[in-house]
Structures are given as structure tokens and as C-alpha cells.
Amino acid sequence: MNDDVSHPWAAGSSGVTPVDELQPAPGDILDSPLRELRRLRHLQPPAPPPELNQLLLTGLPTLRSGRTHRRTILVSGALAVAVATGVSGMAAAHDSPRAGVPVQTSTTSQFDPGDHHQRASLAPRPSPVVPPGAPSTPTEPENDPTPSERVDDRAASSSITPPSAPSRSATPRREREGSDDRARFTSPGPRPSTSFTHRDE
Amino acid sequence: MTAPITDGVVRAAQDGEAAAFRVIYEELAPVVLGYLTAKGVADPEAVTADVFLAALPRLRELSGGAAGLRTFVMSVAHARMVDDARRRRRQPVWCQYDVASDLRSAASAEHDAMELLGAARVVELLRDLPADQREVLVLRVVADLSVQEVATVIGRSPGAVKQLQHRAVRKLRQIVIEQGVTA
């Protein structure tokens, strides 16, 4: 195994020649043990297990998920700050009637304690400073591009759903509830269907 | 023979290219497996896979090119080996005897004539070395790391590594003489 000396890593990154005691002369008593020890580095590993094989074949997904994880933490952190700001803003609006804005009132009325996504999607908007004349419609979050603008990376935008998904999921949820209601209330009369027609518009 | 790991391969792996991952695995997996085998890890093949499962996704954090990659992978292997040793100390693993996987199996007389010492014999010899000396010797010889790189992996100073290596070689020579093993 004298060719090991010419191996680019034999001297390591320092480029220093290996110490002689690890390269004994051919007749030395340690030559055979060290040669056998060195031979261990040529053991052939078995076929990689499926999980590792997937990583070796695709490469990217694991790295992407790691990056996504970091982004998710950042986005969720930003959302947490926004929610805190929004809550404090709502509290301030509640304390002082002059600061109250119709948008906040409408969102407060729609606030669902269990729906974190809805809360998160509504909170980032700087709604307390919206001009009083601005329309406050419940469907406004669907058209709000602010959350998706934060996720500027196109690779991550497909996998990071929390900022944009809530606004999409909020309405379908209502629609689902509505459809359930519709299924539930088909016989009583036309009232549910008219309300949904109005919502679709 | 696989392509050598260059800085370009490392950069490609950091970009997540699967081909670069395969080059790294094919080049370093035998080294890691040899290291874990020499250290007496119970299931070196499985731990080798664990090492790469842990190391490859973290390549973005890596700096230092090919040499840095080697040190990084061996650091992960070292950590896994330590985990394995601790786990086995806590709960000994009972398993059925398997002739095929028994490294102690004696070779035939012909084989003895051709090869006085096999890998299993060397592993047996290494077991008589103190743990830190064995670690340095295996990392230097099997993993082919420099003194500086070994120091990084085991968290000691380069001077301490040189000292441990010198003692390991001296001790190994003594063991070989005592056991009457000749080259």
C-alpha cells in the first residue's frame, strides 16, 4: 500500500508528509499490522438503505426541506410578531373608539379562536391605519398579496403554505361549512342558496 | 474506482446535486465503514448509512472544501461511534452467533501463509490499545486524516494528537512483540 502516500489525503489538508512511524519500512514488525489496518479503508459498504438511496438519487429534497424548515421558522416568527401587533392594535382599538376601524371590527366578528390560519392571514395587514373610507369586505384577504410577497423564493413558495394558504383555506372552509349547511338545510327553503350566491359574487 | 472528491464536487453537493452526493458516498463510505469496523462498532454498515444520512443534508453548513468535507464526515462518524459505544454500555445487545460475520474466524493454513495478519487480527490488536490512542491511530491510518484534522475530529490539540499517535505506535509495537506476531 505504498501508493497511499501519493493519495491526496495522505498528508491531509496541511500537505505535510505523513509521519514515518505510520509508514514503517517493508521489513518492520509494524508494517504488516499497519498495512492491514490501512486496508480497512477499502471495505465495500453494502447497498445503501432506501432512505439513503433516495437521498443519493434525488439529492435536493432533503436540502430543500431543511431550507424550508428554516424559512418556516422565520415566517412563523414574523407571523407571531404580526399577530401580537395585531392583537395589541385591536386591544388599543377596543380601548379607544377613535382608533377603531371597520376592518378590525369585521375581522373581530369573524374571529375564530381555533382558526390560527385565519388569524395569521388577517393580522399582518396594517389595518388600523387604513383610511376610514376604505371598503372592508370579508373576502379581502384573498386578494391580499402581502403574505405571498414575503415568500420571495420560488422554490420555497410551493412548499411554504402558511402565509398564503390561510387566505385560500379560509374561504373554502366557509364554503365547506356552507356546503355542509347546504346539505343539511336543503329542505327548509331557498335562503341558504341565496346567501351562497351572494357570497360567490 | 470513483472520481476523487474535489472542491467542485463539494460545491455541487452543497447545491444539492445527487451526482455529487453519490461521488462523496462512494469515496467516503468505505473509509467510514473501515473506521467503524476498526473501532468495533456492532453494526458498522448500519451506522455508516446513519452517518451519511446525517452528514449529507448538512453539507450547506460545511466550509473548507474537500478536506473540510472529509473532516466533517469523520466527525459525524466519530460521534456516531461514541453513541454506539454508550448505547452498548447501557444495554448489551444479544444476538445469535453468525459464522459469516465472525471476524475472529481463523483462516486456513494456506491463507495464513499468504497473509499473516488480517483485518480481524488488527482489530484484535487495536483492542489492547487505550481508547484515545486507538482513536488517533485509526483516524490517522484508516481515515487517512492529518494530525490537524484528527485534532478537529476528537477535539484535542495537534500536539496531543501527535503524542497519542506516538504512544499508540509504540504500544502497538510492544503488543505485536509480546504476542509473537511477525511480519
Image: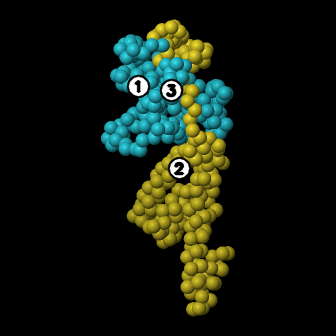
Which type of secondary structure does the marked residue at label 1 adopt?
A: helix
Tell me which residue sits at (44%, 60%) in the image. Answer: A87
Front residue of B122/A177: it is: B122
Q: What residue is pinned by disc 1?
A: B124
Which type of secondary structure does the marked residue at label 2 adopt?
A: helix
Q: Is residue B49 visible?
A: yes
Q: Nearer the viewer, mark 2 or mark 1?
A: 1
The residues bearing labels 3 and 2 have C-alpha atoms spaced at a distance of 61 Å
Q: Nearer the viewer, mark 3 or mark 1?
A: 3
The residues bearing labels 3 and 1 have C-alpha atoms spaced at a distance of 18 Å
Which of the 4 image quadrants contains residue A178?
A: bottom right
Q: Chain of mark 1?
A: B
Front residue of A49/B107: it is: B107
- In the rendered image of the structure, the colour used to display chain B is cyan
Q: Chain of mark 3?
A: B
Determine which of the numbered discs, if any, sits on residue B108 in the image: 3
- Do tags 3 and 2 sit on the same chain? no
* Chain letter of the yellow region: A
Determine which of the numbered discs, if any, sits on residue A72 in the image: 2
Q: Amino acid at mark 3?
A: Ser
Residue furthest out toward the front:
B109
Instruction: Determine whether label 3 and label 2 are within 8 Å by CB.
Output: no
- Do tags 3 and 1 sit on the same chain? yes
The x, y position of residue A77, in whole percent, is: 48, 50
The x, y position of residue B24, in whole percent, is: 60, 32
